Image: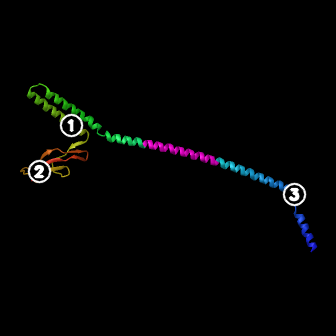
Amino acid sequence: MSEQKTNNEEQIEQEQPTVEEAEVIEQTEQNDEEKFASLDEEFKTKMEAKVAAAEEKAQEAHDKYLRTHADFENIKKRLEKEKYQAIDYASEKFAKDLLTTMDTLEMALQSANSEADPSELIEKMKEGIELTLKNMVTTFEKHDISVVETEEFDPQVHNAVMQVDSDEKESGQIVQVMQKGYMYKERLLRPAMVSIAN
Protein backbone atom coordinates (compact mmCIF):
# COMPACT_ATOMS: atom_id res chain seq x y z
CA MET A 1 0.00 0.00 0.00
CA SER A 2 2.88 2.34 0.72
CA GLU A 3 4.18 1.66 -2.75
CA GLN A 4 0.86 2.74 -4.15
CA LYS A 5 0.98 5.99 -2.18
CA THR A 6 4.39 6.65 -3.43
CA ASN A 7 3.32 6.11 -7.00
CA ASN A 8 0.36 8.42 -6.51
CA GLU A 9 2.51 11.06 -4.89
CA GLU A 10 5.00 10.82 -7.69
CA GLN A 11 2.22 11.13 -10.20
CA ILE A 12 0.79 14.19 -8.39
CA GLU A 13 4.21 15.74 -8.19
CA GLN A 14 4.71 15.14 -11.86
CA GLU A 15 1.31 16.69 -12.67
CA GLN A 16 1.98 19.81 -10.60
CA PRO A 17 3.67 22.50 -12.65
CA THR A 18 6.99 23.81 -11.77
CA VAL A 19 7.37 27.40 -10.55
CA GLU A 20 8.35 28.53 -14.02
CA GLU A 21 5.41 26.74 -15.59
CA ALA A 22 3.09 28.24 -12.95
CA GLU A 23 4.35 31.73 -13.77
CA VAL A 24 3.83 31.12 -17.48
CA ILE A 25 0.30 29.87 -16.81
CA GLU A 26 -0.43 32.83 -14.59
CA GLN A 27 0.96 35.22 -17.17
CA THR A 28 -1.11 33.55 -19.90
CA GLU A 29 -4.23 33.85 -17.77
CA GLN A 30 -3.52 37.54 -17.16
CA ASN A 31 -2.94 38.09 -20.86
CA ASP A 32 -6.20 36.31 -21.64
CA GLU A 33 -8.06 38.42 -19.07
CA GLU A 34 -6.53 41.58 -20.51
CA LYS A 35 -7.44 40.49 -24.04
CA PHE A 36 -11.02 39.75 -22.95
CA ALA A 37 -11.16 43.02 -21.05
CA SER A 38 -9.87 44.95 -24.07
CA LEU A 39 -12.27 43.05 -26.37
CA ASP A 40 -15.10 43.70 -23.92
CA GLU A 41 -14.18 47.41 -23.77
CA GLU A 42 -13.97 47.60 -27.57
CA PHE A 43 -17.36 45.85 -27.88
CA LYS A 44 -18.88 48.24 -25.32
CA THR A 45 -17.47 51.24 -27.20
CA LYS A 46 -18.87 49.98 -30.54
CA MET A 47 -22.25 49.22 -29.01
CA GLU A 48 -22.41 52.61 -27.28
CA ALA A 49 -21.57 54.28 -30.61
CA LYS A 50 -24.31 52.29 -32.35
CA VAL A 51 -26.83 53.09 -29.61
CA ALA A 52 -25.90 56.79 -29.78
CA ALA A 53 -26.30 56.76 -33.59
CA ALA A 54 -29.65 54.98 -33.29
CA GLU A 55 -30.85 57.46 -30.64
CA GLU A 56 -29.76 60.37 -32.86
CA LYS A 57 -31.65 58.91 -35.84
CA ALA A 58 -34.70 58.31 -33.65
CA GLN A 59 -34.56 61.92 -32.41
CA GLU A 60 -34.25 63.20 -36.00
CA ALA A 61 -37.20 61.05 -37.05
CA HIS A 62 -39.23 62.31 -34.07
CA ASP A 63 -38.38 65.94 -34.89
CA LYS A 64 -39.28 65.36 -38.55
CA TYR A 65 -42.58 63.78 -37.48
CA LEU A 66 -43.38 66.75 -35.24
CA ARG A 67 -42.60 69.23 -38.04
CA THR A 68 -44.64 67.25 -40.55
CA HIS A 69 -47.55 66.96 -38.12
CA ALA A 70 -47.43 70.72 -37.45
CA ASP A 71 -47.35 71.43 -41.20
CA PHE A 72 -50.28 69.09 -41.72
CA GLU A 73 -52.29 70.80 -38.98
CA ASN A 74 -51.52 74.23 -40.46
CA ILE A 75 -52.57 73.10 -43.95
CA LYS A 76 -55.72 71.53 -42.51
CA LYS A 77 -56.64 74.79 -40.72
CA ARG A 78 -55.90 76.84 -43.85
CA LEU A 79 -58.03 74.57 -46.06
CA GLU A 80 -60.86 74.66 -43.51
CA LYS A 81 -60.70 78.47 -43.51
CA GLU A 82 -60.63 78.57 -47.33
CA LYS A 83 -63.59 76.18 -47.48
CA TYR A 84 -65.70 78.41 -45.25
CA GLN A 85 -64.63 81.48 -47.22
CA ALA A 86 -65.61 79.74 -50.46
CA ILE A 87 -69.02 78.91 -48.98
CA ASP A 88 -69.47 82.45 -47.63
CA TYR A 89 -68.52 84.05 -50.95
CA ALA A 90 -69.98 81.45 -53.33
CA SER A 91 -72.52 83.94 -54.71
CA GLU A 92 -69.97 86.73 -55.23
CA LYS A 93 -69.67 86.21 -59.00
CA PHE A 94 -73.44 86.06 -59.42
CA ALA A 95 -73.87 89.17 -57.26
CA LYS A 96 -71.30 91.08 -59.37
CA ASP A 97 -73.18 90.13 -62.53
CA LEU A 98 -76.45 91.40 -61.02
CA LEU A 99 -74.92 94.87 -60.51
CA THR A 100 -75.44 95.64 -64.22
CA THR A 101 -79.13 94.84 -63.84
CA MET A 102 -79.27 97.08 -60.77
CA ASP A 103 -77.67 99.92 -62.74
CA THR A 104 -80.24 99.48 -65.52
CA LEU A 105 -83.12 99.64 -63.03
CA GLU A 106 -81.70 102.81 -61.43
CA MET A 107 -81.37 104.44 -64.85
CA ALA A 108 -84.99 103.50 -65.64
CA LEU A 109 -86.10 105.05 -62.35
CA GLN A 110 -84.18 108.27 -63.11
CA SER A 111 -85.88 108.41 -66.51
CA ALA A 112 -89.27 108.04 -64.82
CA ASN A 113 -88.50 110.99 -62.51
CA SER A 114 -87.63 113.30 -65.40
CA GLU A 115 -90.15 115.88 -66.59
CA ALA A 116 -90.56 114.38 -70.03
CA ASP A 117 -93.73 113.96 -72.07
CA PRO A 118 -95.88 111.11 -70.61
CA SER A 119 -95.95 109.15 -73.88
CA GLU A 120 -92.15 109.54 -74.20
CA LEU A 121 -91.79 108.52 -70.54
CA ILE A 122 -93.78 105.33 -71.09
CA GLU A 123 -91.61 104.47 -74.08
CA LYS A 124 -88.43 105.01 -72.03
CA MET A 125 -89.82 102.91 -69.17
CA LYS A 126 -90.68 100.11 -71.57
CA GLU A 127 -87.20 100.29 -73.07
CA GLY A 128 -85.63 100.24 -69.58
CA ILE A 129 -87.66 97.22 -68.50
CA GLU A 130 -86.75 95.34 -71.70
CA LEU A 131 -83.07 96.15 -71.19
CA THR A 132 -83.28 95.01 -67.57
CA LEU A 133 -84.90 91.71 -68.57
CA LYS A 134 -82.27 91.20 -71.26
CA ASN A 135 -79.52 91.76 -68.67
CA MET A 136 -81.20 89.31 -66.27
CA VAL A 137 -81.52 86.62 -68.96
CA THR A 138 -77.84 87.09 -69.92
CA THR A 139 -76.78 86.84 -66.26
CA PHE A 140 -78.90 83.73 -65.74
CA GLU A 141 -77.46 82.04 -68.84
CA LYS A 142 -73.94 82.90 -67.69
CA HIS A 143 -74.60 81.14 -64.35
CA ASP A 144 -76.40 78.09 -65.82
CA ILE A 145 -79.86 79.21 -64.71
CA SER A 146 -82.48 78.27 -67.28
CA VAL A 147 -86.25 78.56 -67.64
CA VAL A 148 -88.23 75.34 -67.13
CA GLU A 149 -89.67 74.09 -70.43
CA THR A 150 -93.47 74.18 -70.56
CA GLU A 151 -94.27 72.25 -73.72
CA GLU A 152 -95.43 69.10 -71.90
CA PHE A 153 -96.57 68.72 -68.31
CA ASP A 154 -93.99 67.12 -65.98
CA PRO A 155 -95.00 66.92 -62.29
CA GLN A 156 -91.33 67.04 -61.28
CA VAL A 157 -90.84 70.54 -62.68
CA HIS A 158 -94.39 71.87 -63.02
CA ASN A 159 -96.91 72.75 -60.32
CA ALA A 160 -100.49 72.49 -61.62
CA VAL A 161 -102.41 75.11 -59.65
CA MET A 162 -105.66 74.84 -61.55
CA GLN A 163 -107.52 72.83 -64.19
CA VAL A 164 -109.36 74.60 -66.97
CA ASP A 165 -111.58 73.55 -69.86
CA SER A 166 -109.83 73.87 -73.19
CA ASP A 167 -110.89 73.00 -76.70
CA GLU A 168 -107.36 73.42 -78.07
CA LYS A 169 -105.46 71.25 -75.55
CA GLU A 170 -105.89 67.61 -74.59
CA SER A 171 -106.51 66.59 -70.98
CA GLY A 172 -103.38 66.97 -68.83
CA GLN A 173 -101.61 69.36 -71.22
CA ILE A 174 -100.42 72.82 -70.12
CA VAL A 175 -102.87 75.57 -71.07
CA GLN A 176 -101.20 78.59 -69.46
CA VAL A 177 -97.98 79.41 -67.60
CA MET A 178 -98.82 81.61 -64.62
CA GLN A 179 -95.28 81.83 -63.23
CA LYS A 180 -92.07 80.66 -64.87
CA GLY A 181 -90.01 77.96 -63.25
CA TYR A 182 -86.20 77.94 -63.13
CA MET A 183 -83.46 75.32 -63.05
CA TYR A 184 -79.92 75.75 -61.76
CA LYS A 185 -77.90 73.27 -63.83
CA GLU A 186 -79.75 70.00 -63.06
CA ARG A 187 -81.43 71.22 -59.87
CA LEU A 188 -84.91 72.74 -59.72
CA LEU A 189 -84.89 76.24 -58.19
CA ARG A 190 -88.61 76.82 -58.54
CA PRO A 191 -91.32 74.80 -60.32
CA ALA A 192 -93.35 76.49 -63.04
CA MET A 193 -96.91 77.33 -61.93
CA VAL A 194 -99.27 76.23 -64.70
CA SER A 195 -102.87 75.54 -65.45
CA ILE A 196 -103.68 72.29 -67.23
CA ALA A 197 -106.56 71.16 -69.40
CA ASN A 198 -109.34 68.97 -68.00
Question: Mark 3 or mark 2: which comes first in sequence?
Answer: 3
Q: Is residue 92 covered in magenta? A: no
State the quadrant of the N terminus.
bottom right
Q: Which residue is mark 2?
A: 162
Instruction: Tell me the mark number nearer the camera, choosing from 1 and 2.
Output: 2
Residue 151 percent across, percent down from the top left: 15, 48
The amino acid at mark 1 is Met
**Dots 1 and 2: beta carbons under 8 Å?**
no
What's the residue at 19%, 30% (across, down)?
106
- Which is more toward the observer, 158 or 40? 40
Secondary structure of the residue carrying numbered label 3 = helix
The answer to whether residue 152 is left or right of residue 63 is left
Name the residue nearer the viewer: 104 or 166. 104
Q: Nearer the viewer, residue 35 or 66?
A: 66
Q: Amino acid at mark 3?
A: Glu
> In 3D space, how far apart are the residues under numbered discs 3 and 2 (Cα atoms)?
129 Å
Identify the colour scheme used: rainbow
> Residue 82: x, y in percent?
37, 40
Real-space CA distance between mark 3 and mark 1, rounded to the nearest whole angstrom: 118 Å
Label 3: which residue? 21
Residue 105, compared with residue 35, is above or below; it is above
Residue 165, how many percent across, how many down?
7, 51
Residue at 93 percent across and 73 percent down: it is 2
Is label 1 in a helix, a strand or a loop? helix
Is 18 situated above or below 63?
Answer: below
Q: Residue at x 87, y 57 (%)?
A: 21
Location of mark 1 (residue): 136
The reply to whether the magenta stretch includes residue 59 is: yes
What range is drawn magenta here?
50-75
Q: Amino acid at mark 2?
A: Met
